[in-house]
Amino acid sequence: MHFGSGNAKHVYVIGGSAVSSVEQLTDLGLTHTPDFSYATHLRNLVTKASRVSGMVYRVFSTRNESFLIKFFKKYGRPMLIICP
């Protein structure tokens, strides 16, 4: 990964093989991009929480609002915490 807009984006070689470059990487649960934006990381978190809430809605036949809110607070909301 090459950080910054002024980076020359050199091709690095180890043992005669070029090291591949990536557009984003995840380290310690945080998604990094070359422009230092957290938009990708936040989008991934929201997608994961949305999937959990959809799964809860499909698995349980009850539509009791207080039950669904408690369940989401227990299992969905912790995924939205920015710090891993």
Image (tube, grey):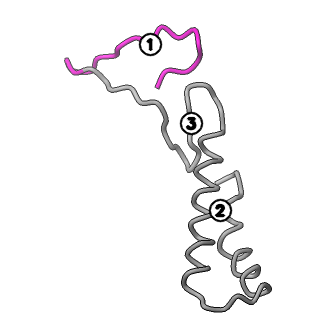
Outermost residue toward the left in this view: 16
Q: How many C-alpha atoms fall within 10 Å of the one at disc 3: few (<14), some, or many (≥20)?
A: some
Q: CA distance from mark 2 to mark 1?
A: 34 Å
What residue is drawn where x is 56% and y is 81%? 58
Which three-letter amino acid code belongs to the residue tagged 1?
Lys
Can you tell which mark lies on residue 79? 2
Three-letter amino acid code at the position of disc 3: His
Residue 25: x and y, percent?
48, 38
Badge 3 or badge 2: first in the primary sequence: 3
Instruction: Tell me the number on the disc at residue 53.
Output: none
State the separation of the CA atoms marked 1 and 3.
17 Å
Q: Magenta part mainly helix, strand or loop?
A: loop
Find disc 1 in the rendering and name its residue: 9
Frontmost residue, 46 versus 63? 63
- Residue depicted at x 70% and y 88%: 63
Residue 78, given in percent of the width and then of the height, sits at: 69, 66
Residue for badge 3? 32
Kind of residue at disc 2? Met
Q: Is residue 6 magenta?
A: yes
Q: Quadrant of residue 84?
A: bottom right
Crowdedness near tag 1: few (<14), some (14–19) or many (≥20) residues, C-alpha within 10 Å: few
Q: Nearer the viewer, residue 19 or 69?
A: 69
CB contact under 8 Å: marks 3 and 2: no
Quadrant position of residue 74: bottom right
**SS at mark 3 in the image:** strand
Between discs 2 and 1, the one toward the N terminus: 1
Q: Nearer the viewer, residue 48 or 36?
A: 48
**Which region of the structure is painted magenta?**
1-17
> In this picture, is 58 found above or below 11?
below
The image shows residue 73 at horizontal and vertical percentages of: 74, 74
